[in-house]
Image (cartoon, rainbow, N blue to C red):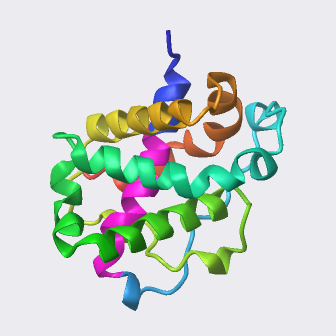
Amino acid sequence: MRDSRSGVVVTSLLAVIAASACGSSKKEETTTTTEPPVEETSEAAACGVDICATYGPAVPKVASDITDKAAADPQFAKFFEPLVKKGPDAIAAFKKRLADFIAVAYGCADPSTYTGADMKTAHAGMGITSQQYDDFITLVAGVLAANGVPESDINACFAPPLVAPEFKAMIVEQ
């Protein structure tokens, strides 16, 4: 049984991914911005692996899988439809921005690597509900698991920076 932290992790990861993709129409006019790093919690300190060394190389595939899975999911397709309509080049650029965002968010890349919009700007006007956010995070957790990330690492390593209510509030509008 998955505990509530997995849901939060997936939601946060989804939000990161969606922001990278969904903010694509504004990315050209947005300077590089990222949310401030979340202070390390006792759970984050409990992560027994070097996230960047262990999972860093898989970030592009995970970002790609999340994008593909979300775009094909009826619950999230409407958010990804404008991106999909732009074609393969736009989708590839979105996947790269998402991978860059994830790498920066976990301290695996210089902040200047991510050139997309901040979370609030990227999701403005999308009307994302709390339930959609939570469901997206579940999707992301599933992608992480499918890519070989053990649930213990999802919970101890990926979840802590994403569970902050302030982060969810940047995405959820309803």
Q: Residue at x 28, y 79 (%)?
A: 25
Q: Is residue 111 visible?
A: yes
The image shows a total of numbered marks equal to 0
* Position of 80 relative to 51 (above/below): below
Left of 104 or right of it: where is 130? left
Left of 14 or right of it: where is 53? right
* Position of 81 relative to 131 (above/below): below
Q: Is residue 22 magenta?
A: yes
Left of 65 or right of it: where is 127? left
* Position of 135 relative to 79 (above/below): above
Location of residue 74 in the rendering, given as x and y in whole percent from the top left corner = 16, 40
Q: Nearer the viewer, residue 10 or 150?
A: 150
Q: Is residue 20 magenta?
A: yes
Q: Residue at x 46, y 29 (%)?
A: 7
Q: Residue furthest top?
A: 1
Q: Nearer the viewer, residue 104 or 33?
A: 104
Q: Is residue 170 visible?
A: no
Location of residue 29 in the rendering, given as x and y in whole percent from the top left corner = 38, 90
Q: Residue furthest bottom?
A: 29
Left of 33 or right of it: where is 122? left
* Prevailing SS of the magenta stretch: helix
Q: Residue at x 48, y 63 (%)?
A: 98
Q: Residue at x 49, y 33 (%)?
A: 141
Q: Residue furthest front?
A: 88
Location of residue 172 in the rendering, given as x and y in whole percent from the top left corner = 32, 49
Question: Residue 21 appears in which quarter of the rendering?
Answer: bottom left
Question: Residue 80 appears in which quarter of the rendering?
Answer: bottom left
* Position of 19 relative to 158 (above/below): below
Q: Which residues are magenta?
A: 11-26
